[in-house]
Image: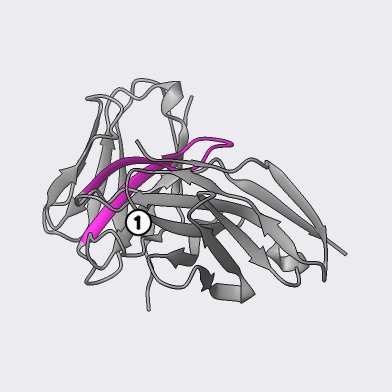
Amino acid sequence: AQSVAQPEDQVNVAEGNPLTVKCTYSVSGNPYLFWYVQYPNRGLQFLLKYITGDNLVKGSYGFEAEFNKSQTSFHLKKPSALVSDSALYFCAVRDHTGTASKLTFGTGTRLQVTL
Amino acid sequence: GAGVSQTPSNKVTEKGKYVELRCDPISGHTALYWYRQSLGQGPEFLIYFQGTGAADDSGLPNDRFFAVRPEGSVSTLKIQRTERGDSAVYLCASSPLAGNTDTQYFGPGTRLTVL
């Protein structure tokens, strides 16, 4: 069974500082990995995904994520945080095998960016 | 273009009642997914459709839950004899196809409260 762990319930960072939101995964075979962001009373917005190729993936709003197969991680990063980045972030994984199409999500990490 | 839309945005019902939640996917998207998000948790997969047929309904918690997509576009999630534990945000997503690499685009959700 596939699973995702987001070890931090909340990450606090000052505006202008770099941010990292952690994600590790467990899946049989090669993973497809996704990051989504959720603002209050809104649905999930897609940020970026790793399918294959370059381990560093660039996405929306200046976010990027690094796939590390040996550590089974896919941490989300941004060089300089903005107050408007404050939201709930979800990592998700999909199994590479078969035609299974569902996403398995982590429990989410709340990012709080302060002035 | 228009994203995924869901109606109603909020639904309050009494224990034992029947409810229907509607999802309008992005035009032309073949695959449609339903997820349920409980407070403080990540979304959990319920069911997905490829065209008109339910390709995977392994996430439906019991036989009180049922979903249809009769014309391959709009989908309705139906919950019979609602229970307080059904209270959650129900999210719908669509993707162009049902391939493992496809991005799922989410709607804003329906918040269901069972009193």
Quarter of the figure with residue A27: top left
Q: What residue type is labelled 1?
A: Ala
Residue B94 versus residue B13: which sits nearer the camera? B94
B50 to A82, vertically: above or below? above
Chain designation of label 1: B
Residue A87 versus residue B98: which sits nearer the camera? B98
Q: Which residue reaches farthest front?
A: A70
Residue B58 percent across, percent down from the top left: 24, 34
The residue at 54%/49% (across/down) is A71
Neighbour tally class for label 1: few under 14, some 14-19, many 20 plus, Cα within 10 Å: many
Q: Which residue reaches farthest right?
A: A115
Task: Identify the magenta region.
Answer: B31-48
A22 displayed left or right of B11: right
What residue is disc 1 on? Answer: B93
Residue B57 percent across, percent down from the top left: 22, 38
Which of the image's four quarters has the C terminus of chain A? bottom right
The residue at 30%/68% (across/down) is B26
Residue A80 percent across, percent down from the top left: 76, 72
Count of picture labels: 1
Q: Which residue reaches farthest bottom?
A: B1
